[in-house]
Each structure stands twice: as C-alpha cells, then as structure tokens.
Amino acid sequence: MALYPELDTPSVLIDLDVMEDNIARMQAVADRAGVRLRPHTKTHKSPWVAGRQAEKGASGVTVAKIGEAEVMADGGIRDILIAYPLYGEYKLRRLRPLLERVKITLSLDNAEVAEGISRLGQETGRKIPVYLEVDTGIHRLGRDPGMETVEVARDLVKLPGIDLIGLITHAGQGHDARNREELIGVARHEGRALLETAEMMRREGIETREISVGSSPTAPFVSEVPGVTEMRPGTYIYNDVMQIDAGVATQEQCAATVLVTVISRPAPDRAVVDGGSKTFSSDAPASYGHGEVGPRRHPGFGMVVGRPDLILQRLNEEHGMMGLADPSMDLKVGDRLRIIPNHVCGMINMHDEVIGVRGSLIERTIPVAGRGKIR
C-alpha cells in the first residue's frame, strides 16, 4: 500500500511522536543542568511548534530576524531573543512596536549597532536588554574571548538606552567534531570561554548576569560547564542527516522526512523522484561543515528511510536522481519513499506547510509561518 495515499507529493511529514520525544529529551537536558532552554525557531519556523516547546518548559524562543519575531509574537510567544544584530532605522522602526507587545532581548557584537538600539531605548523610556556576542570558534560574529570582547563591553556600558545582560555564542563548529570526545571539548570551550570573559568583565565592574550558549550538537553537554544560564539549540526538534553525522541523533530521532514519488525509471541504475533542490534545498553532505571535517557516513542529498540501497545522488530544481546499487532491485514508477534531508532548516524554509502525522494517520497541517522572513 502506498505511503499516505491521501497526500500529494512532494510533502514534508513531521512525525509528531518523534518531535514530542525530542522536545522532552532536550528539556530534560536543560532541567538536569539547571539552565533555561530557549530553542531557536530556525528549524520549525512555527508558532504552533514553539507552543509545544513552551508547554514542556522552554522559557521563550530565539529567532534571527525581525520578521521571525513578528510571526512568533503574532502566534502568542511572549519572550523572544533576536540573536542577530539589528542595524538601521528601518529595523528599529519595526522593533519599536514589538517592544510594546512582548519581552524582547537582542544580541550584537559592536558599538555601532548598539548606538541605534540605545537611541531607541531612550526614546521609549526603557533600557533594552542585549547580549554581547563572542566568537568561540565558528568565526562568524563576535570578537575573540578575553580582552577583545571586554573592550567592546566597555563601550556598550556607556550607552544609556541598553542593558548589557551578558554574553552569547554559537559553537556551530561542533558539527565538525570527529567523535564524542571532540564534541565535549567544543562544548567545554564554548562555555568556559564565555565564563572566563565574564569574569574579566566583572573585574572591571561590568556586571554579567547571563551566559547563553547554542547549537544542537553541543547542547547535550551543557552540564559540562557549570555557570551557563541558557542554551539555544534549534535543529534537535526535527533532526537531520547533519545531526546523525555529528553523532547526536539517530535515524529514529529524525522527525522530518520528505515524502516523494518515483516518477521515472529511465535507466537500470537510476530512478527519478518528484523532489529536487526546490524541495530538499541544495545542501550536499560536505556543504554544512564550518572547517575541515572528517568523513561523512551518509552520501547524497538525504537518507532514504528503510532503503540503504538507494542514494539520492543528484538534484535539479524539480528532479531528484536516485542511484540504485543493484539495477534489478524492485523500484517502479508510483512507488513512494521517505527521505531524511541533509539540512532540515534549509528544507523547511522552502515549504509553506508541513504535515503532522502519527503512525499512518495524518493529524494536522502545520503552517511554516516564519518561512522567507529574511528581514
């Protein structure tokens, strides 16, 4: 019998039982470590899913853009961290009404961004809470830990319209760890670098109340660094091949799959499915590392559930070319497959909605309300 015959393909399926187990598992990690869990919504982009996380104990959400914050506020989320520098009058005009509606915290790594936020804080008669971002190895935003960050903090505390509440980082380089020991090392460095920098700030009279760390790979090891107050993993909610390769998830813990249909068997060693780069995104196995990486266990553009003999080798915009290890294997036009994406965050952002299922039953349609909110 065909998988979910009532659905057209390609469709994104969310196994709600697996999603709920993932929510409970990460909340238990946070509770044991005594830290707040503030999940990043970059993976699900759904106020409904964020509400399920809040029901189990999440303190709020993390987003990257004003548009995402607006979607979450409209969906009833009341505590939002915008973990991205907001620069320019246009963004500040949009931030102003959000400050009236919900609790907003910001992050930044320079005084130029902070000056605009401080002006808004003065105009609205409130100090806006901000984190100062530190680079603990991903080499994206933030200065190096230590005095480079302290120097920026000195400038920030002079601004009257902001409240510097602490330090924040994202150790995305955890995906590059080759084994559990390396991953624990990344997590320890992530937390300790912030704590040591915070102590240097305190010696200069700069109060540091919060230490916020991120990334799904390092989150399970947050208890390795006492003193962290908050963690912000995102991908754990659904998981993907990237998390499997990082050693922090199993195939059974991947809640999101793409349901596709075989539409052609044009050659003995090739089948074509009706999902391409516009369905899966173009994240290839080696494209999501942040530096030198070890060997990946899973080739191709996704993992075919229950069919290790199939490899999604190539993508065009609307076509997925499936390689067959054995040309005589049973795979025909009309067959349906479920495929775990390499990078679930990019994949979800390409779809207007996902389908929540339990076993063979379809339970609900979940709008991806935050998709495309790049401003």
Image: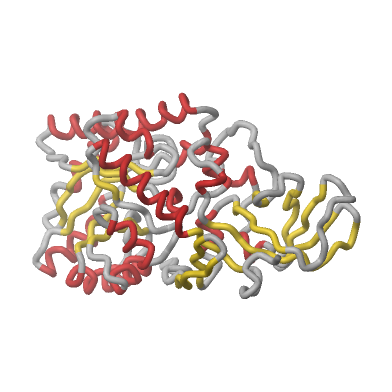
Of residues 20 and 297, the one nearer the viewer is: 20
Residue at screen point 44% across, 48% down: 236
Q: In the rendered image of this protein, does residue 200 appear above or below residue 238?
A: above
Of residues 315 and 143, the one nearer the viewer is: 315
- Where residue 5 appears, as percent x and y from the top left, is 65, 72
Image quadrant holding the C terminus, namely: bottom left
Of residues 159 and 215, the one nearer the viewer is: 215
Q: In the rendered image of this protein, does residue 3 appear above or below residue 218?
A: below
Q: In the rendered image of this protein, does residue 372 appear above or below residue 237?
A: below
- Where residue 22 appears, as percent x and y from the top left, is 42, 49
- Where residue 252 appears, as percent x and y from the top left, is 54, 46
Q: Give residue 78's quadrant in the image.
A: bottom left
Image quadrant holding the N terminus, namely: bottom right
- Where residue 143 appears, as percent x and y from the top left, is 34, 39
- How many numbered badges does the structure rendering display? 0
Tell me, yes or no, if residue 112 can be seen here: no
Q: Give residue 116's quadrant in the image.
A: bottom left
Residue at screen point 39% across, 46% down: 141
Q: Is residue 159 left or right of residue 336?
A: left
Of residues 15 and 176, the one nearer the viewer is: 15
Residue at screen point 13% across, 69% down: 123
Q: In the rendered image of this protein, does residue 240 appear above or below residue 186?
A: below
- The colour scheme used to paint the residues is secondary structure
Residue at screen point 46% across, 71% down: 364
Q: Is residue 145 left or right of residue 343?
A: left
Residue situated furthest top in the rendering: 181
Tell me, yes or no, if residue 160 can be seen here: yes
